[in-house]
Every structure is written in C-alpha cells, then in structure tokens.
Amino acid sequence: MEMSPAEQERFREILTAHKRELEKRVDRIHEHAREPLEADSSEQAAQLGNVQVVSALENEAVQEITQIDAALRRLEDGRYGVCITCGEDISPKRLEAWPASAECVDCAETSGPR
C-alpha cells in the first residue's frame, strides 16, 4: 500500500498517542498494585478479585502496546498497510478502525486476532 508521507505521519501520530495512553494505564495499574491489602479478610478477598481483573486489563494493554510497536516498525520499514500473511493491502477502512492491524480482513478471519 502506497501511502503519502502525510498519511504515514498521521498513522504514526495515532499509533504513538494510543501507545502513550496504554503505557499510562499500565503505570497506573502498577501503582495500584503496590497498595497494601486491607486487614479485613473479606476486604482482602474483594481486593484480590479486583487484582485479577486489573491483571487481565494490564495484559490486554501490554499486548496492544506490542501490536502498536510492530505497526510502528512496519511503518518505518515501508511495510505498513500490507498484510503480513498474504502480502495484499490492508483496506484503509480497517486501518482507520484499528491502525495496528497486521492482516487484511480475510487473513485475520482465518487466523484469528493478532
């Protein structure tokens, strides 16, 4: 997919801004994780349940950061917007919806989320 320098810069900015948001979220999660548990056992149980939910959110954010980093590398290498599986262009609509897309719709449906 041939993109103009302006389009490349726009996607770079979108990806970088989203990455910063995710990194802030992960930092807040880490700060929250340092808070001591309550003395009351029922409160501890609730807090531990929250820790599991927060851990899942952290894992999701870290995965998204990894996908964004890969998209930024593809952008630098001139491979951004090209499906990593079949080599066809990724539709502009798909890139607008999820700028870190690594696969075209057909390949993504076949292989599952990346």
Image: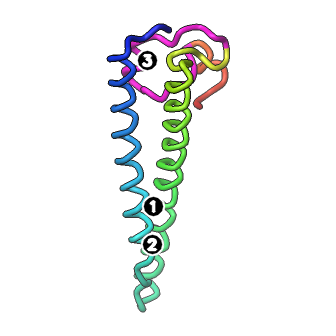
Residue 35: horizontal and vertical position, in percent?
40, 79
SS label for mark 1: helix
Between 58 and 18, the residue placed more toward the observer is 18
Identify the amino acid type marked 2.
Ala
SS label for mark 3: helix
Identify the amino acid type marked 3.
Arg
Between 43 and 33, the residue placed more toward the observer is 33
Residue 79: horizontal and vertical position, in percent?
56, 18
Residue 98: horizontal and vertical position, in percent?
42, 27
Reading the chain from its start, which is encountered first: label 2 or label 1?
2
Q: Which residue is mark 3?
A: 94
Residue 97: horizontal and vertical position, in percent?
38, 23
Q: Which residue is mark 1?
A: 54
Secondary structure mostly seen in magenta is: loop
Q: Quadrant of residue 110?
A: top right
Please determine whether, in this image, residue 93 is positioned above or below residue 60: above
Residue range of the region highlighted in magenta in the rendering: 86-105
Q: Which residue is mark 2?
A: 33
